[in-house]
Image (cartoon, grey):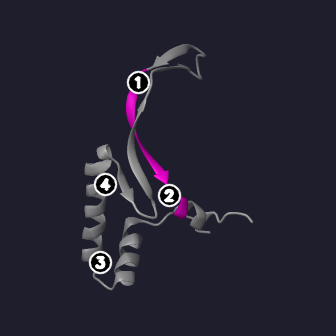
Amino acid sequence: MATKPMTKGEIVDHLAKKVGTTKKVANQFLDELVKLSYKEAKKSFTIPGLGKLTVVARKKRTGINPFTKEKMVIPAKKVLKFKVSKQAQNAVFPPKK
């Protein structure tokens, strides 16, 4: 198991070697994929085999300040969520038989 996450440079280097292209082209591809995911996230953006990026509306709720133990109202807001695909889940953590 890896001790630290891959950097962007390591990801670009790996993609360039796997696809047989230059690091510059691999970097442009990765940047465009990220930009496209930001742009399309409001409508839901799926990367097949990896997961889905969606906007979810959270309702107004009551919470407790952990320092003062005071009750407070947490306002409603929209958040970005990423749901991992079943394929990715099974690739990382194979199902037990």
Tag on residue 57? none
Q: Are marks 4 and 1 in contact (CB under 8 Å)?
A: no
The amino acid sitting under disc 4 is: Ser
Tag on residue 37? 4
Q: Position of residue 89 (x, y in %)?
A: 57, 60
Q: Position of residue 38 (x, y in %)?
A: 29, 50
Q: Are marks 4 and 2 in contact (CB under 8 Å)?
A: no
Residue at the spot of label 3: 23
Q: Position of residue 10 (x, y in %)?
A: 41, 72
Q: Are marks 4 and 3 in contact (CB under 8 Å)?
A: no
Dominant SS type (magenta): strand
Circle 4 or circle 3, nearest the eye: 4
Residue at the spot of label 1: 76
Measure how far apart labels 4 and 3 are at the Cα level.
21 Å
Q: Which residues are magenta?
A: 75-87
Q: Which element is circle 1 on?
A: loop
Q: Which element is circle 2 on?
A: loop
The amino acid sitting under disc 3 is: Lys
Q: Which element is circle 3 on?
A: helix
Measure how far apart labels 1 and 3 are at the Cα level.
43 Å
Q: Position of residue 95 (x, y in %)?
A: 67, 63
Residue under the image location 39 percent in, 82 percent down: 18
Residue at the spot of label 2: 85
